[in-house]
Image: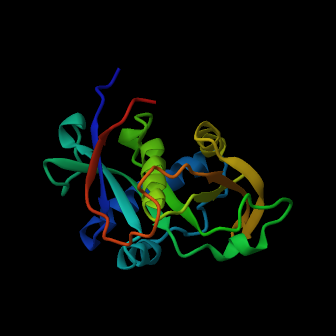
Amino acid sequence: MNPMPTLRFRTATPDDCDRILTIIRQAQAQMRALGSAQWQDGYPARPDIEADIIHERGIVAQIKAAFQPNTPEGQPSEWLTVGYAAVVFDGEPAYTALEGGCWQTPEPYVVVHRLAVADEAKRRGIATALMLHAAKLAARRGIRSFRIDTAHENHYMQALLARLGFSSCGTVRYRSGERIAYERLLPLAAGESGCHHGHHTAHTSKVSNQ
């Protein structure tokens, strides 16, 4: 069993862009190998990640590089970026045209897009940890609705969402096709209601293996 890594999160910066794109391309290749059409039309591309960084919605997950013997060239010696997600609080236009169901609440929501984990860090709980971190950021803003979508053939993501307590609410459509839409209502921790719009600083935690 791999040792339990120390994991931290921070807001992505322009210096992270190349590493994030490497992780995205790995995810695209995995989807292609599984016969999925998701992310096979050039999305996400560099402009998508750059926009995330400009708007401070890109989050990187990093582990101590010592846990990864083959640290990619150019990565800092102490921390290695192994996951990425865009945590968005200003809505998703496609969600205004939900088909075949309804959202659980009309309240403001957080949505996660462009979730990806590096090949060398698969099955370490990184995707789960990124989702839980997004939920924590939402709770700090007093937001309890957490929405996300995924392709019909993305069974890994569907299983992850089921484990995290998300429910299918219908389908939404993008240029690249139809997606299953999910929502989870988050419990708000005592003292964490209200709006907090500060910059995302680095947070560390422990994650279990998956």
Give the vertical position of 180 relative to 108 (above or below).
above
Relative side of 180 to 18, left or right: right
- The residue that appears at 71% across and 47% down in the rendered structure is 167
| x then y, percent, for residue 7 | 29, 43
Q: Residue furthest top?
A: 1
Q: Is residue 153 visible?
A: no
| x then y, percent, for residue 183 | 66, 54
| x then y, percent, for residue 182 | 68, 54
Indicate the quadrant where residue 196 lies.
bottom left
Relative side of 25 to 168, left or right: left
Q: Residue furthest right?
A: 100
Relative side of 43 to 5, left or right: right
Question: Quarter of the image containing the N terminus?
Answer: top left
Relative side of 124 to 101, left or right: left
Query: Which residue is more in the foreground, 116 or 204?
Result: 204
Query: Which residue is more in the foreground, 91 or 155?
Result: 91
> Which coloring applies here?
rainbow
| x then y, percent, for residue 36 | 66, 51
- The residue that appears at 53% across and 63% down in the rendered structure is 143
Q: Is residue 100 visible?
A: yes
- The residue that appears at 36% across and 35% down in the rendered structure is 207
**Number of marks drawn:** 0
Q: Residue furthest front?
A: 191
Give the vertical position of 58 relative to 126 (above or below).
below
- The residue that appears at 47% across and 71% down in the rendered structure is 45
